[in-house]
Image (tube, rainbow, N blue to C red):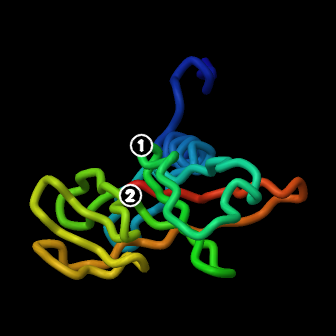
Amino acid sequence: MASDPKAEGMNRRQFLFLTAAALAGAGCNTVENSGSYTVSKERMINAGPVGDYAADGVYDRFRNDGFFVVRRSEKLFVLSSFCTHRKCKLNAESDHSFYCKCHGSTFDPDGNVTTGPAKRNLPIFPAFLDEHGQLLVRVSAG
């Protein structure tokens, strides 16, 4: 009597194919040579019209979303709002520097470490203007 393949379930090859397809569809990235997968925590945030950032300064409206928008002269860029030491939220200071209240790290207006314990500068996130003049920021966690 012939067996029904659907009744027996899937074989190892089918399972691996479906697992890989599901992970790829969920936005996961393979970690090379480790045989494991990590989930991408990257997201795109609309930070509003670029005109909202016309004056020089640090804009902290998206601090809780993970970034500061910084305008200095003709330069507009986006810095992480999390300390590179232990991921505490940073405070933007009046001199446009950044301070971590958790362990005392400080960063200059470009995101460079000025006082530790942090050893790494703040990441700069990619930012783009869409066709409607909206500032889109690609934020990655971790």
Residue 13 spot, x, y in % from top left: 52, 48
Left or right side of 104 for 18: right
In the picture, residue 2 is in which quadrant? top right
Q: Is residue 109 left or right of residue 24?
A: left
Circles 2, 1 touching at the beta carbon (< 8 Å): yes
Q: Residue at x 13, y 53 (%)?
A: 102
Which quadrant is home to the N terminus? Answer: top right
Q: Specify the farthest residue to the right.
A: 131
Indicate the position of residue 133 as horizontal and vertical percent values: 83, 57
Given residues 51 and 68, the one toward you in this image is: 51
- Seen at 51% across and 46% down, the residue is 61
Up-down: is 61 above or below 122?
above
Within 10 Å of disc 2 (Cα), the crowding (few <14, some 14-19, many 20+) is many
N-terminal of the pair, mark 2 or mark 1, is: 1
Looking at the rendered structure, the secondary structure element under dot 2 is loop
Q: Which mark is residue 81?
A: 2
| Residue located 43% across and 49% down the image | 63
In the depicted structure, whether residue 102 falls above or below residue 123: above
Judging by the rendered image, the residue that carries numbered circle 1 is 64
